[in-house]
Image (spheres, coloured by chain):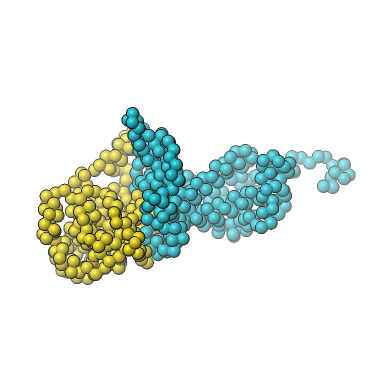
Chain colours: A yellow, B cyan
Amino acid sequence: MKRRLFLASGLTALTGCGLGNALNESPVHRILGSAETLDHFVIGTRGAAKLYRPDDVDRDFRTNGFDPPSDTAYQRMLRDGFSSYRLVVDGEVENKAAFTLNELRALQSLTQITRHDCVEGWSAIGQWGGVPVGKFLALVRPTPRARYAVFHCLDRAPDDTPYYESLDLHQAVHPQTLLALELNGKPLDAAHGAPVRLKVPTQLGYKSAKWVGRIELAATFEGIGGGNGGYWEDQGYEWYAGI
Amino acid sequence: MDATIDGAVQPPADAEVRPLVYRHSLATRLTHWISALALVVLVASGLQIFNAAPYLDASDKSNPHKRVLQFGATTTPSGANEGVTILFGHTFRTTHLFGYTDDGMGGQAQRAFPGWLTLPGYQDLADGRRWHLFFAWVFVLCGVAYIVAGLTRRDLRLLILRPSDVPKLWPMQAYYLRLRAEPPPHGKYNPLQKLAYTLVIFVFSPLIVLSGLALSPGIDAIAGPLTTAFGGRQFARLWHFVFMLALLGFFATHLVLVATTGVVNNLRSMILGTYRMRREEGTGP
C-alpha cells in the first residue's frame, strides 16, 4: 500500500522504530475513534442534501482518488460500451441477480444536482442521474439478516487491494442515495466511475465509490477487506462519513 | 480610610492591602486547562486537515476565482523548490515556512503548514481528522460545562461586558499604554478583560464550532441554513480558519498578559484558585 509505506516511514522517522499497523490499533486510536460513534449517533443520516440549480453545475467535475481500472476486462467493456457489464447482487438477498447496464437504465428514475464534499476539503457540484439504491434494493429484497450493503468495485489500489465501500441499510435507502449512471446529463465516463457508481450526497466523497461491479448484502462487514467497511476505512478514515 | 484621620493606626500590612482571595472556582480551573489543551490539539490537527486542500475560497463549492488564500510550491529556473503563499492575489515567497516546508519526517516537501505546526507532524489526513473530531467534542462539552457551572455559581456574569463598561474601554486601554496613571474603577475583571472574554466565550467559540459543523455534509443535510449562513461549505471553511486566527490572537495576547502581570500569581490562581490582589484592583462590584 503506497500510503501505508508513507505512513510507516513517517512513523519510523518519528519514533525511530517501525510501528506500522500497531499504532492504528493503539488505545489512543480507540479513544479518538469513540467520536465517530458519537457523531454517527448524534448526526446520523437525517434530512436531505441541498439541491442546486443547473447553472451551479461544474461542467468539468473534478476527479480524485484512483485511476480507472486498468485491467483488460474493464478496458474491453469500456470499448464495447459496457454491453458485457453486469451488476451482480448477492449475499443476504432473496433475489440474487445480475443486471445489465440497459436494465439499470430502464430503472433510472432520479436526477439530482448535489454538492460533492471531499474529505480533503474541496467541493464540486454535479448533476447525477440514476437508480435510487432503495428502489434497487426493493427489487432484490434483502433478507432480515442483511444490515449492510457492501459495494465491491472494479478498481484496485496501487498495491492491488480491491476498492470497496459500505452503507448500512438506513443510509442505503435514503432517497438521495443513488446508483449513478449519468453525470451532467451524459453517461458516466471512465474517470468518473463508468458505468455505475455510488453517489451519497449526505456523506463525504469517499463513500461515493466509483466503478461498482457487485453489491453484497451482508449482516456484517467484519470479514470483508480489512474489516472496517471500506478501502479508506481500512486506512484509518471513519466509516461514518457524515462529518 | 479612618486610619489616616486619627493618624494613630500603623500603616496597613501588605496582606491587608493585597489580600489573598479565592478567585477561580474548581470548575473554572478545570475547564480552563482542558479547553486550552483542546484548543492546541484542534489548531494543530486542523492545520493537518487544511494541508489536504491548502486553499480557501469565498464560495459554496470550490472556485479558484474566489480564492482568498492559497499555499503552493514552485520550482525556480535554477531547480530550487520554493514555497509560495498567495493572499488576495498577492504572492509571497514563504519557502521553509509555508508551501514548501518541513514534512514532519526530517525533510522538506510541498506542504502548506510545516510538520512542527501539525498533528500528526507527517501528512496523515485520517489521523488529523480523528484528533480533530475527538477534541471538538472535548472543546464543546468543556464549554457547556463551563457555562453551566458559571451560571450556577453566578460568577459568569462578572465576566460579561455590559453597556456601562463600554465608556471605560478606552481609559483602560490608555492605562495599559501608560497614558493614564490609574485604571478606571472596575470589579473582578477590567472592561478590556470583559470585552476579550465575552468575545471569546460567547462569539468566537460558538462561531468556530458552528462553522466547523457547517463543513460536514451530514449537518448540512439536517441544518442547511447553517451552511448557507456562512456563505456555503467553502466559505464556512474560510470562516472556520478566520475564527481560529481570532482565537489564536486572543491566546497570544492572553499569554503576554499572563506573563507580564505577575506570572506566578496568575498561574497560582488558575491552578490553586488563590490570587493575591494587586494594589490598583478594587474589590468592589
Return the x and y of residue A13 as percentages of the image width and height: 34, 34
Return the x and y of residue B178 as percentages of the image width and height: 69, 39
**In the visual, does B97 lie left or right of A132?**
right
Please name whichever residue, B200 or A17, is drawn nearer the observer in this view of the structure: B200
Q: Residue at x 87, y 41 (%)?
A: B8
Return the x and y of residue B175 as percentages of the image width and height: 69, 43
Q: Is residue A61 above or below residue A50?
A: above
**In the visual, does B56 lie left or right of B31?**
left
Q: Quadrant of residue A125?
A: bottom left
Q: Quadrant of residue B162?
A: bottom right
Q: Residue at x 52, y 48 (%)?
A: B246
Q: Residue at x 43, y 61 (%)?
A: B228
Return the x and y of residue B122 as percentages of the image width and height: 36, 39
**In the visual, does B71 lie left or right of A173?**
right
| Quadrant of the image containing the C terminus of chain A | bottom left
Q: Is residue A83 above or below residue B264?
A: below
Residue B257 in view, yes or no: yes
Q: Is residue B72 above or below residue A179?
A: above
Please name whichever residue, B261 or B115, is drawn nearer the observer in this view of the structure: B115
